[in-house]
């Protein structure tokens, strides 16, 4: 199977998964929480294994401590997905606020350029999203992560399908150029 065929299949699967996630954001939220828990758990284990290859006692101790924290975070999220949902929703709200604030600050630094309005607008939207999540917390926890997952899957699916279509167009253009003139 060609790579381009896999792109279209992955794009369609991602698009369908995103739509399904938006139709049931609570189930998608739980899926996102379990996925995050497993990622933290495996990441922590890999960090722990790699920590022993660190040179220097201080670096090794910090690497081991970090690995333990990440592993425990994964275990806690998997053991109590509701608490994980609440925690990850707060983390998402904080990330919205922080990224929005950074974009607004950057926008003010590039005032008078073409970057000003896009940075300012996306920064204010991110701040608004963060404020909204905090204002509706803990109720927003039930659907926020699933909604974000659904939106990400839809955009990923559209991007993969567009990549497939662009690849076909580029291939056709190259074939047209490569054909000998009659």
Image (tube, rainbow, N blue to C red):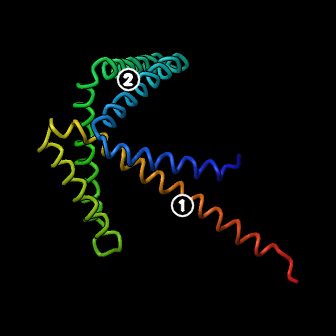
Q: Is residue 122 left or right of residue 130?
A: right
Q: Position of residue 59 (x, y in %)?
A: 45, 22
Q: Position of residue 65 (x, y in %)?
A: 38, 18
In the rendered image, which quarter is residue 93 located in?
top left
Above or below 143: residue 170: below
Give the residue at the far left of this rendering.
135
Q: Is residue 85 left or right of residue 131?
A: right
Q: Is residue 69 left or right of residue 140?
A: right
The residue at 36%/46% (across/down) is 150
Quarter of the C terminus within the rendering: bottom right
The residue at 26%/64% (across/down) is 120
Above or below 41: residue 112: below
The residue at 26%/31% (across/down) is 85
Above or below 101: residue 58: above
Residue picked out by circle 1: 162
Element under disc 2: helix
Q: Which mark is residue 126?
A: none
Element under disc 1: helix
Dots 1, 2 in contact, CB < 8 A: no
Q: Position of residue 6 (x, y in %)?
A: 62, 47
Disc with the residue nearer the chain's start (1 vs 2): 2
Residue picked out by circle 2: 70
Above or below 182: residue 179: above
Could you say which is closer to the camera, residue 64 or residue 32? 32
Q: Position of residue 131 (x, y in %)?
A: 16, 48
Q: Residues within 10 Å of mark 2 (few under 14, many from 20)?
A: many
Q: Residues within 10 Å of mark 1 (few under 14, many from 20)?
A: some
Could you say which is closer to the camera, residue 61 or residue 170? 170
For discs 1 and 2, the disc positioned in front in the rendered view: 1
Distance Cα–Cα, label 1 vs label 2: 36 Å
């Amino acid at each position: 199977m060609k790579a381009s065929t896999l792109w279209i299949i992955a794009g369609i699967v991602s698009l369908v998964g995103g739509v399904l996630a938006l139709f049931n954001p609570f189930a998608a939220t739980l899926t996102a929480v379990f996925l995050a828990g497993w990622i933290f758990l495996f990441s922590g284990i890999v960090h722990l294994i790699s920590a022993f290859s660190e040179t220097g006692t201080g670096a090794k101790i910090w690497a081991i401590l970090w690995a333990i924290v990440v592993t425990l975070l994964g275990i806690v999220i998997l053991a109590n997905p509701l608490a994980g949902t609440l925690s990850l929703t707060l983390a998402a709200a904080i990330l919205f606020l922080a990224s929005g604030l950074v974009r607004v600050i950057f926008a003010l630094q590039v005032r008078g350029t073409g970057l000003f309005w896009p940075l300012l607008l996306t920064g204010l939207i991110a701040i608004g999203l963060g404020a909204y999540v905090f204002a509706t917390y803990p109720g927003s926890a039930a659907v926020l992560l699933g909604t974000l997952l659904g939106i990400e899957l839809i955009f990923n699916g559209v991007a993969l399908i567009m990549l497939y279509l662009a690849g076909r167009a580029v291939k056709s253009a190259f074939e047209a150029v490569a054909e000998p003139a009659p």
